[in-house]
Each structure stands twice: as structure tokens, then as C-alpha cells.
Image (cartoon, rainbow, N blue to C red):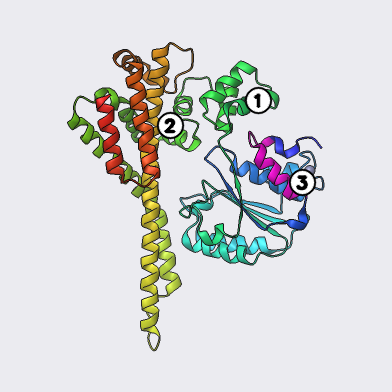
Amino acid sequence: MSAGVWAEVVGQPAVVAQLRAAAENPAAMTHSWLFTGPPGSGRSVAARAFAAALQCPDHGCGRCPSCRTIMAGTHPDVRQVVPEGLSIRVDEMRNLVQLAARRPATAPYQILVITDADRLTEGAANALLKAVEEPPERTVFLLCAPSDHQDDVPITIRSRCRVVALRTPTPDAIAEVLVNRDGIDRERAAWAAAVAGGHVGRARHLARDGLAPDTAEWAAAVSGGHVGRARHLARDPKARSHRETILGLPLRMRGLGDAFAFAGDLVRTAKEEASTLSEGRDLAEREELAVAMGAGGTGKGVAAAARGAKAAERELERRQRSRNTRTQRDAIDRALVDLAGFLRDALIAGSGARVPLSNPDVETDIRRAAGEWTPESVLRRLEAVLACRTALEENVKPEIAVEAMMTALHRG
Ligand SMILES: [Zn+2]
């Protein structure tokens, strides 16, 4: 058999081997799968290819009507959920779980692909959990999320899934696909793959028609391959000015006072961003909980029910806080990635290497930094940014980690 549908899964040989083996051995079938990986790594493409391999008599030939309709998203027994708002709500999920419990119309399985399982509300996750706990015989759930961390996917669901862990594909793997499948010439493919920072779709787009110097392309080039970030930058002037502030920061730092002030700004902005993102989902979850607990009531048992409701409320608040902390750290991390990109560019500019810059729009600043600082000093700054990322991963308080980094940036 040729590569078939697996050819769509770029730069993930281990994942393809795992899924192929599973699809070709239906006796050992698992009903619930969790595809994890950074955005752009191809989580939902891998899930769709796996769905095709399960439904196709040849385990994913890529040519039959079943494979073709699944990859196009129109197969009647493969349903894909793409949340429209910030979250997938409980009523929507109940409905989907019911549909997934039906016998498949034509294919061996009834498959439900949930592309952003990390956006389920608590209530929706519970509705899904019931189905995952006792899956109908011919139903398969394919969940996609950034990670299997409990803030993305509840432990109760995670523990019932087999995890398929995708990594960021290398620029070489991406370029290979662009050359062999899309017929793009090698030089252009290599350029697009390098600029797209591991995001296959973005690289393809850039290689095909992305040379016009408009906002969209600029956003793609500077967003480190993250398609959501590119969109955000292209649409939101506030996000653009925030990025500009961050990139300008190393050169604007004139004293230790600046270092502390900039650290405060960075953490505060991240907090604001996180609360804007959390608002919609937090509110939906509180409403769900209130409905589940029922309002009012009289007679025996009311006091006990009220205590139960209080406990559930506290538990929900705790989880929302933990998720909010994580969102906040992600926002700081984006700023750190921008900073690291700027310093990397300064190193490249200083070395005279003919490598494209990550932030071509601030080339003047990059050249100035490369002229003012020795390569060793640029490297020390870069190390401080990377150390800050590590510290945040290890749960150091953001204020402390960011202040330490800014102080190091000031010292040079
Ligand atoms: Zn097929």
C-alpha cells in the first residue's frame, strides 16, 4: 500500500506507525483517543487520517470514496466538532454524544472528532465523560488538545484515552511535503518551511501565494508559525502594538528602574489578556453549574443540597483559577518567544549569516542591537529569556521570573 491518507500527516513517523498498527488491528481497538501537540502540528489532520484508516477497507488508501469524503469532512459517519465561540457547551455536547451513539450508517464505526477538547466547558466534559466511560460498541471518540495536562483535558477523560503525541514538524519535513506533494520548487519550499516555524498549513499557504507584502503575510512571518497568533496579529491592532512594545524593549532599557517597570507591564498585560479570554467560558460554566444544582426548593434535604452546591462551586472556582493562571503564563510565554526571536535575529545580523530574520519588520532595531552589543552579550540576554521560560514552566511566580529576566536584559 502507498502512503495513502498518512501522507497528510507531516513529519510524524512515530505517530503514523502507532495509528497504522491500531487501524490494522481492529480486535485491539480503543474507543477513545487523545491527539496532543502544539497548534499547527497537525492534530486534527492526524485524527482525520486515523478516522479514514478505520473506515476504509484498505485502512486508509486515500483514493476510495470513504477516504476522500472523510478527508474532505463530508462522511456521514465521521462527525467533526469545531467550536464556534470560546467553548463547547453542554447542550451541544449532549446532542453530539447522542448522535455518536447511533449505529453507523455505512461504515464500520461512528466517529466523533473533537478538534478543541480543551475548550469544553466542565458540563460538556462531563457529558462526554459518560460516553467515554461506556462507549457504544461501534463508536470512536478522537479528541484533540494542546496537551494532556489536566487543565486541557480532565484527568477522568484523559485516563480513558490512548494518547497520540505529535511534535512540531521540522522545517525539512515540511519542505519535503511542499516539494513532493504540492509541486513547489525546492528553494521556495525551504523558505516557506523556515518562516512558518513548524506550521504545515501556514508553510503551504506562504509557498503558494504568500509573497504579497500585506498584513496577513507579515503576520504569518512574525508569528513563529502559530496560525492563531498570525490571525490575532493581523486583526487586532492592540496585539500588534503589544508585540512592537515587546520587541522594542531591549533597546529602550536605560536603567534598573526600567527593568522593573517593564516587568510589571508585561505581567499586567498578560493578566488582562487571560481574563478577557476566560470570561466567556467561566460564565458559561457557572451558569451550567447553577442549572445542574437547581435553584430554590423546600423541605428535607435542601440544606444538604445547598452544602453540596457550595462545594461544587468552590471546586469550579478553583479549576477556573488554575486555568486562568495557565492562560496568563501562555500570554507571558508569547512575549518571551517574541523577545527570544529578536535576540536570535540580533545574533544572526551580527554574524553576517545569510539566514532570514524572524522579525524582518524591525530590522533597523535588530541591526542597532547587533552593532551595540557583543555577540556574547546578546547570547547572555537570549539565555536570560530562555531561563525565564523554564522558570515559568517550573511554576516560579511570573513577577519574580520576569523581573529576574529584565534585570539580566538590562545588565547585558
Ligand atoms: Zn480508502
Q: Is residue 153 magenta?
A: no
Residue 304 is left or right of residue 404, and the answer is right
Residue at x 67% of width, y 26% of height: 182
Mark positioned earlier in the residue sequence (3 or 1):
3
Residue at x 53% of width, y 24% of height: 194
- Check residue 393 in the rendering and tell me which mark sits there, or answer none: none
Q: Dot 2, how many residues are within 10 Å of its Cα: few (below 14), some (14-19), or many (20+)?
A: some
Secondary-structure class at tag 2: helix
Mark positioned earlier in the residue sequence (2 or 3):
3
Q: Which residue is mark 2?
A: 234
Name which residue type carries label 2: Ala
Name which residue type carries label 3: Ser
Which image quadrant is residue 381 in? top left
Q: Which residue is mark 1?
A: 176
Mark positioned earlier in the residue sequence (1 or 2):
1
Which image quadrant is residue 61 in? top right
Q: Dot 3, how many residues are within 10 Å of its Cα: few (below 14), some (14-19), or many (20+)?
A: many
